[in-house]
Amino acid sequence: MRIVVAEDLYLLRDGMVRLLEAYGHQVVATATTGPETLDVLLTQRPDVAVVDVRMPPTQSDEGLRAALDARRQVPGLPILILSQHVEQLYARELLADGTGGIGYFLKESVFDADQFVDALERVAGGGTAMDPAVIAKLLSSGTSNRRLERLTEREHDVLGLMAEGLSNQAIGQRLFLSESAISKHTTSIFGKLGITDDGNNNRRVLAVLTYLNNA
């Protein structure tokens, strides 16, 4: 994969570059400020980018806003936000376009290299990779949605794990259910959320985005 790393802390930025290159990926550019992040995202158009939220010049939300601006100009540009903070307003805006290719992890939740690279690959493929802590934060201030209210408790559990980017097999292992049972739950979720298989949309991504934006 061609990757952009936007992180202002030298040791963390250099560590990610070395890690990604060790996995056989190419880091085509790095950025240390918000404006620089937007510039390299638009000029390089990477397969995926790792972007911190709080970057110079003000250390507030420059990185996340740069990611939003880049996705407005390049719809679907895959972005994995990696931060110590959950910026709820901009995070919801990042999810709202419904195109997928989005991830949001807290730095403290990344426990090993395989987990991190796997999340990047899912995002690069147009999927989602959401930290459970980020999901909980987004849902804590969400609004009610009648379609989501139709879901059973088990279906909510399945959809939450789907938001983390887990496959049906992995969800089944987590919930101690068979893969066929998870498949039935996901089919039911798609039906209750009104998500049809038109051959163009990734139904898992659409279900996850509905969950995170409206739960």
Image: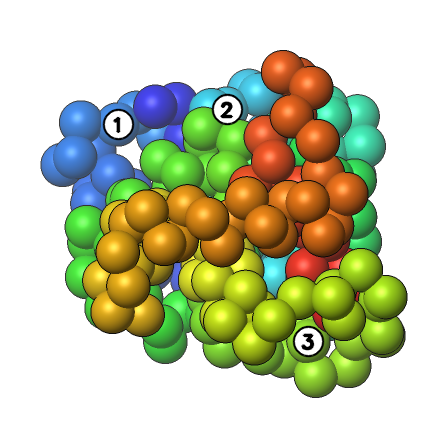
Residue 52 position, x and y percent, is 54, 57
Mark 1 or mark 2, which is nearer the start of the sequence? 1
Q: CA distance from mark 3 to mark 1?
A: 34 Å
Distance in Å between CA atoms under marks 3 and 2: 30 Å
* x then y, percent, for residue 210: 73, 53
The amino acid on which the numbered mark 1 sits, given as a three-letter code, is His
Q: Residue visible at 56% across and 76% down?
A: 153
Q: How many marks?
A: 3
Residues tagged 3 and 1 counted as in contact (Cβ below 8 A): no
Type of amino acid under label 3: Leu
**Quarter of the rendering containing residue 144:** bottom right
Identity, as a three-letter code, of the amino acid under mark 2: Pro
Is residue 37 visible from the viewing direction of this image? no
**Residue that extends furthest to the left in the rendered view of this protein:** 22
Query: Which residue is found at the position 40% from the left and 38% from the top?
Result: 122
Camera-side residue of 184 and 19: 184
Q: Nearer the viewer, residue 57 or 100?
A: 100
Lower sequence index among marks 3 and 1: 1
Name the image quarter holding the N terminus: top left
Label 1 Cα neighbours within 10 Å, binned few <14 / some 14-19 / many ≥20? some
Residue count near mark 2 (Cα–Cα under 10 Å), binned few <14, some 14–19, many ≥20: many
200 or 182, which lies in front? 182
- The quadrant of the picture occupied by the C terminus is bottom right
Label disc, if present, on residue 181 of the rendered structure? none
Q: Which mark is residue 46?
A: 2
Mark 3 or mark 1, whichever is nearer to me: 3
* Residue position for label 1: 25
Q: Would residue 208 be found to the left or right of residue 214 on screen?
A: left
> Which of these two is toward me, 105 or 143?
143
Looking at the rendering, which quadrant does residue 195 occupy? Answer: top right
